[in-house]
Image (cartoon, rainbow, N blue to C red):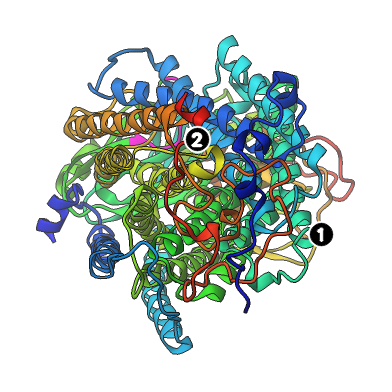
Amino acid sequence: MEFMRTILALPAGASTFADRVDGLHIFVITVTMIMSTLVFVAAAWFTIHYHRKRDDQLTKRLSASAFREGGIIGGILVLFVTWWLIGYRQYIEIMEPPPDAEVVYVDAKQWMWKFAYADGRSSNDTLTVPVGRPVKLVMTSRDVIHSFFVPEFRVKHDVLPGRYVTLWFQATKPGVYPIWCAEYCGVSHSLMRGQVRVLTAAEYEQWKSAGSDVILEADCGTGPGSCGGADLAEIGRAVAERRQCLACHTLDGQPHIGPTWSRLFGSTRELADGRRVVADEAYLTRSMMEPNVDLVAGYRDVMPVYQGVLQPAEAAAIVELIRSLRDGQPPSGVSLPKLEIEAVLDGGTSP
Amino acid sequence: MTTLAPTVPSPRDALPKAAQPTYLNVETTLRSWLLTTDHKRIGILYLVSIVVFFALGGVFALAIRLEHLTPNPTLMDAMTYNRMFTLHGVVMVWLFLIPSIPAVFGNFVLPIMLGAKDVAFPRLNLASWYIFMAGSIIVLVSTISSGIDTGWTFYPPYSSYSNTAVPTALFGVFIIGFSTIITGVNFIVTTHTMRKSGLRWLQMPLLVWALYGTSIIQVLATPVLGMVLLLVMLDNGLGWGFFNPATGGDPVLFQHLFWFYSHPAVYIMILPSMGVVSEVVTTFSRKNPFSYKAIAYSSLGIAFVGFLTWGHHMFVSGMSKFDAGAFGILSMLVAIFSAIKVFNWTWTLKGGAVSLKTPLLYVFAFLFLFVFGGMTGVAVAATSLDVHWHDTYFVVAHFHFIMVGGALTGFLAALHYWFPKMTGKMYSERLGLLSAALVFAGFFATFFPQFLLGNAGMPRRYFNYPPQFQVLHLVSTSGSWILAAGLIIAAIVLLYALKWGHPVGPNPWGSRSFEWRTDSPPPKHNFHREPNFDVGTYDYTQPLLGKYDDPRPLPPLPQDVA
């Protein structure tokens, strides 16, 4: 494997996917090189062996038998489908984050990567993750399309403005690995590089407890329990208040103009048009940006569109707040405001 | 089957050459060229224009390769580099590859292959060239004014914001689209209605099948491109927001629409090349194709299934997992049709009487490069591998193997193969072989290292790159100059032959294909008399009696010597 990696210029693998993806890679590329060489050699051999002897030489009619033709097609089809089966299984695994993954929010802009961790700290261009534990990235862009690519992990995903996408990996070796933007994003595209710092479990705990005091750039507002030193969910609470989300959504399970955020995350929602969707990060973000698309059954279409209003980091913080309320209990550090609920059913037009 | 009676004198045998005008010298004024409705002359007009555009795109390519000699700025700044690779892509795709074989050689030989005097709509045919030129000039004007820096894929929302000449360039491409559609309609109608009576579908040369499949794609896919480019023009020029999330649009929708055209567009480029390969392989091996039907029907199969594979450009763009799997398996299905063709071409040589001339050497290059490019395409369709390769140099190498290794070598094979038919002159075979070998070697040296760069993770469209990639970039840049040398030699050889080449008879290759059963160059209406297609287009079991079976060069006529 290492020998073939060297020949193919593949970087050393540093994620749980790398070895298997490279196995398929080596299989496919070896067959490709052999087949193209064989076709060329066959053509050359026929050219030499059946060289034209006279200018007016005639040839016999030779045609493929259906049996042979079918055999070739069948053989190649089996080969291709085998590759597809192996590849698609790996693809599903790469695209489906495990439920226990640690979440980091990624906010891409021209030309830098911003990372926001669940404990409230954030960093630019350097992503710090523990070795041997799944990490899920919830990513969005502020401007144009970028693409998050770590060659050593064999993972990549486009990062789009106006929607959240997820990517996950589990690093297997401590070290520092480059992050490259793979989708052309403007004049400094090639300088939009970052790095993933993979720490051992001990180093990671130390890093976590060191308590960086950097907080998310979305301001904390001045509401109750202002968020000095708070975690991302607390920031989300402040943002939700400032953006008037809490005028319609409650955090404690009471019904109101909009659905409550308590026990919302991960639940299955029945929509007005009969579809059923799971309230995951993508659904929640979409519901902020385009609330009329996935209207929940029993609610009126009164929520304004937050597209272009809400900063990506603010949306991330709100999603984290909703996630923190998945068991109905607010995590420590998040202070829930008490709401005076007046007109549950009059469906006001305030946001 | 009857054969041409050797005793029938052809008009050419009876008359001195000066008395029987060819399509080239029947009229020689500039006006007669610019207002011609002769499909052969229109083919030549296209040939001259796209070769100029190809040279321009080639200069951009060489500049890009030179820039990558060092990891940091070498020749130009980042903005210039971004304009260079965009223009390289736009010029090569829409000003060269899309019109290349259909508009030049399709125009020239398709009607002759069907025994027709011209295409079904000769005036529309001329109009298509003017529309093509108008669009091309608009694209070039955008180049001169401020260029475009979006990449040839014009992905929004970057293209919605870019303050370069995006609307102008898109408008140019939009206009070129009409010429593509007109050519496609013309070929479809010509194939249906203009076949010589008695010429059945399964007796047509395989190039006609390939062009027919291409035309279907041109007619069905190009309108989608036109529509989507128009919407991007509105986004960029007027600040509308079809594809910009900041105004409620969806950038991924653009990608679906764009690739709905641009993936089938790859088959617009490669299918005609495949048709050329079928012609060249049978002519130079003097043998019937190993399976005519398999090659013919797989052309239609590619045209049809090619419409259902666009999503493989979007495995990491934000598409559902189910879609990715479906597009992956459908993409492999297209490769099956290509594999059928490759197998049949190779086994056509078996039992033949093979003569390795320049066109055949280009076809061998095609076989090797196309199989390599095609199978790496299958590799990328194995979804998990694409996650690593997407938007890296691996993809760049893959599609250059198809578009240069496949489509361009097919174009060069066609150019050398039909050069005697178009001009009545023969080029130097030795220098032709040399240039073909240089093109093959130079191409491989340029693009094989790019597969390795992609494996190593080098993203495409990078102006600066990490220094560990420099060695491979160096090899690639060196290769690009070998490739350029091969192309320059080919150009010199052909230009020299145009003036001083030895005159040839009607059928210098001894082919059975129908276009060789008339003079070289052909007369204005293609044939002096009703052509005789009794001997099949791939029937090498019997001699084709008469002067059309004589591969010897003509003795020089007085005016050629003078």
Task: Farthest residue to the right: give it.
Answer: A346
The stretch of residues the image draws in magenta is A180-187
The chain under label 2 reads B
Q: How many marks?
A: 2
* Main secondary structure found in the magenta portion: loop
Q: Distance between the residues labelled 2 and 1?
A: 92 Å
Q: Which mark identifies residue B557?
A: 2
Q: Are marks 2 and 1 on the same chain?
A: no
Q: Where is residue A88 in the image (x, y as percent from the top left)?
A: 42, 67
Vertical placement of residue A11 versus B123, above or below: below
Direction from residue B373 to residue B104 in the image, left or right: right
Vertical placement of residue A60 versus A329, above or below: below
Q: Which residue has dot 1 on it? A: A298
Q: Position of residue B95 (x, y in %)?
A: 58, 32
Disc 2 element? loop
Task: Farthest residue to the bottom: give it.
Answer: A67
Residue type at mark 2: give it: Leu
Q: In this orientation, does residue B50 appear?
A: yes
Q: Pointer 1: residues within 10 angstroms few (<14), some, or many (20+)?
A: few
Disc 1 element? loop
* Nearest-to-viewer mark from 2 and 1: 2
Q: For the point 42% across and 23% down, which residue is it? A: B60
Vertical placement of residue B121 versus A86, above or below: above
Q: Which of A44 and B262 is in front in this view?
A: A44
Direction from residue B165 to residue B468 in the image, left or right: left
Residue A104 found in image quarter? top left
Residue B189 found in image quarter? bottom right
Q: Residue A271: within the magenta? A: no
Q: Position of residue B507 (x, y in %)?
A: 50, 53
Residue type at mark 1: give it: Gly
Q: Which of B436 and A219 is in front in this view?
A: B436
Task: Farthest residue to the left: give it.
Answer: A3
